[in-house]
Image (cartoon, rainbow, N blue to C red):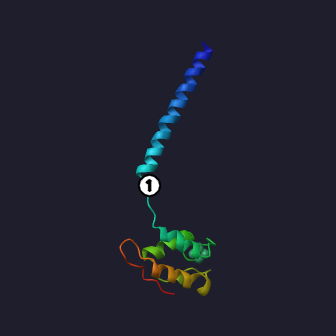
Amino acid sequence: MNGLNLLWGVLILAGLGLFFGAILTLAAIFFKVEEDPRIAEVEKLLPNANCGGCGYAGCHALAEALVKGEVTKVSTCKVGKADKNFQPILAYLASHPGKDGKTPPSTL
Ligand code: SF4
């Protein structure tokens, strides 16, 4: 009798695991957010110190703001160097328009 109860317990827990796993999988598929690939590229060009000196939570957040045009001065990053970081970011953004065909208004 105890072996049968144990088997039912294992089956019920496995069933619950499969059920909630399926729900999480479907949620991940349907609620997936596509990120502009330029954000990752601009983030790579930033110093990636993630110091917050720019007033953003980290380099990813500033990269996102630059790509969206919410920040126009790439020198908002307090750690970056003009020749190593800022000029490559300006060149990248100028040559990679978004889906709308526009490039963000970036300056040094
Ligand atoms: S100041 Fe520069 S290095 Fe620091 S978090 Fe901002 S973008 Fe990253």
Residue at 58%, 16% (x, y): give it: 4
Q: Nearer the viewer, residue 29 or 78?
A: 29
Quadrant position of residue 80: bottom right
The x and y percentages for residue 54 are: 56, 77
In the displayed image of the protein, which residue is found farthest to the front?
95
Disc 1 packing (10 Å; few <14; some 14–19; many ≥20):
few
Q: Amino acid at mark 1?
A: Lys
Quadrant position of residue 87: bottom right
The x and y percentages for residue 41 are: 53, 72
Task: Answer with the quadrant where ligand 1 appears in the image.
Answer: bottom right
* SS for callout 1: loop
The quadrant of the picture occupied by the N terminus is top right
In the displayed image of the protein, which residue is found farthest to the top?
1
Q: Is residue 45 above or below residue 35?
A: below
Q: Can the viewer see residue 52 in this picture?
A: no
The x and y percentages for residue 8 are: 55, 21
Q: Which residue is mark 1?
A: 32
